Amino acid sequence: MTSKELRELNDAKLAEKLTESRKELFGLRFKHATAQLENTRQLSGVKKTIARILTIQQERQGA
């Protein structure tokens, strides 16, 4: 998801998306460790999504 799409979500949906992304990252790391992950670029994409969500949450807390 892009930052623009994430900013349109409310706080509850954003927290839900964060939980979902963290679970996805866990699964991808597990697949990578067992050599089942073919596209390792997915790892960095999910990490960036998590970082975007955390940044947006931090901005909202400060505002």
Image: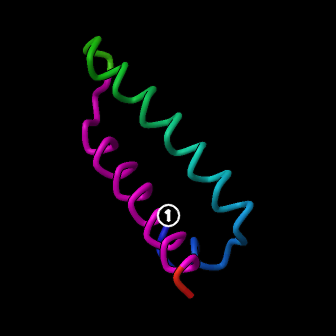
Spot occupied by residue 30 in the image (x, y as percentages of width and height): 37, 19
Magenta stretch holds residue 48:
yes
Spot occupied by residue 5 in the image (x, y as percentages of width and height): 58, 75
Spot occupied by residue 52 in the image (x, y as percentages of width and height): 43, 66
**Figure quadrant of residue 10:** bottom right
Magenta stretch holds residue 51:
yes
Q: Residue furthest top?
A: 34
Q: Which residue is mark 1?
A: 53
- Residue at left 31%, top 25%? 37
Q: Amino acid at mark 1?
A: Ile
- Residue at left 26%, top 17%? 33
Q: Residue furthest bottom?
A: 63
* Direction from residue 15 to residue 53 in the image, left or right: left
In magenta, the rendered stretch is 37-61
Position of 19 relative to 14 (above/below): above
Q: Which element type, helix, strand or loop, lies under badge 1? A: helix
Assign the magenta stretch its main secondary structure.
helix
Spot occupied by residue 40 in the image (x, y as percentages of width and height): 25, 36
Position of 63 relative to 49 (above/below): below
